[in-house]
Image: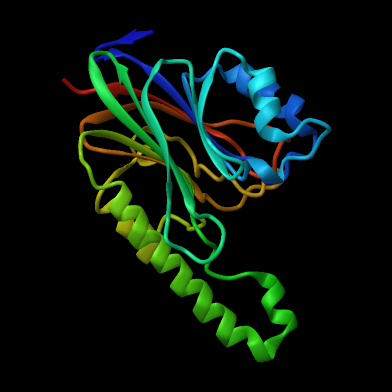
Amino acid sequence: MVGSGGKKLRVMSWNLHHGEFGLPGIVATIKAENPDVILLQEIHEVHGPLRPIEGLFELLPEYRMTGNKESAILTKIPIESGKVHELNLNSDRRYIPEVKLRFDGQLLTFYTTHLYNGFRPVWVRTPGSLIYWSKKAQEDREDQIRELDIVVSKGGYTILGGDFNTIPKGGVYDHFASRFGDSFKHVGRGVGWTFPANFPVVRIDYLWTTPDILTAEFRVVKSSASDHLPIVAEFVMKK
């Protein structure tokens, strides 16, 4: 597809934590949307008879992948380079896949991440530990953001997507908004809520872009294949 600014790149981001219908339901949604690039989080939580990583390779042979059981980037466009950054954290969500590819004559870098939640409802069951766990979660979240900033600090055409576990206001949102454009804010309609999928009430999934990338379209896709709704955007590279 070609727009006034050049070719359009279709990108999907999706947290697959509760893929209740397994990989076939997820793959059906992906095929229906036909993205050029897919940013996936929490792949290892998907249910079904096929192991998620192997299943994705089997059911989406048109894509190439960089990532691991935690998160991955899939692309139909040839990968010029790809790697997985391991953050210096003492818990999960340590991995940041990175892919470089060439689109419309420009070198474009993708990252995907899944930020820590600042609070877990289960902690209220043990009030004596609530202060400790809340403080630790906040520290882990800050450490993760600090290391993510180092990984995604190289400049150039960049798209950062994933589950950021934050609503579009407050310190965490403002931190990323100071460096990137929120693609939903540019052209999205309505409230853009993505979670939970069966009755969405918050927007916590994002596609962030550097200023040299224009957002031509943004949609939240209806799907019951996970507990998050996938988001899909189309981008045009500024020349």
- Quarter-wise, where is residue 53 in the image? top right
Residue 45 lies, with reference to residue 93, above or below; the image says: above
Which residue in the rendered view is the most extreme toward the left? Answer: 239
Residue at 72% in and 45% down:
18
Residue at 30% in and 54% down:
149
- Quarter-wise, where is residue 127 in the image? bottom right
Q: Could you tell me if residue 39 is visible in this image?
A: no
- Quarter-wise, where is residue 119 in the image? bottom right
Pinpoint residue 204: horizontal percent, then vertical percent.
Answer: 51, 51
Pinpoint residue 212: horizontal percent, then vertical percent.
Answer: 21, 31
In depth, the one of 36 and 32 nearer the eye is: 36
In depth, the one of 74 and 197 nearer the eye is: 74
Residue at 42% in and 15% down:
77
Q: Which colour scheme is used?
A: rainbow
Residue at 20% in and 40% down:
155
The quadrant of the rendering that contains the C terminus is top left
The quadrant of the rendering that contains the N terminus is top left
Image check: 39 left or right of 133?
Answer: left
Which residue in the rendered view is the most extreme toward the top? Answer: 1
Q: Could you tell me if residue 80 is visible in this image?
A: yes
In depth, the one of 195 and 146 nearer the eye is: 146
Pinpoint residue 129: horizontal percent, then vertical percent.
Answer: 64, 87
Residue 34 lies, with reference to residue 45, above or below; the image says: above
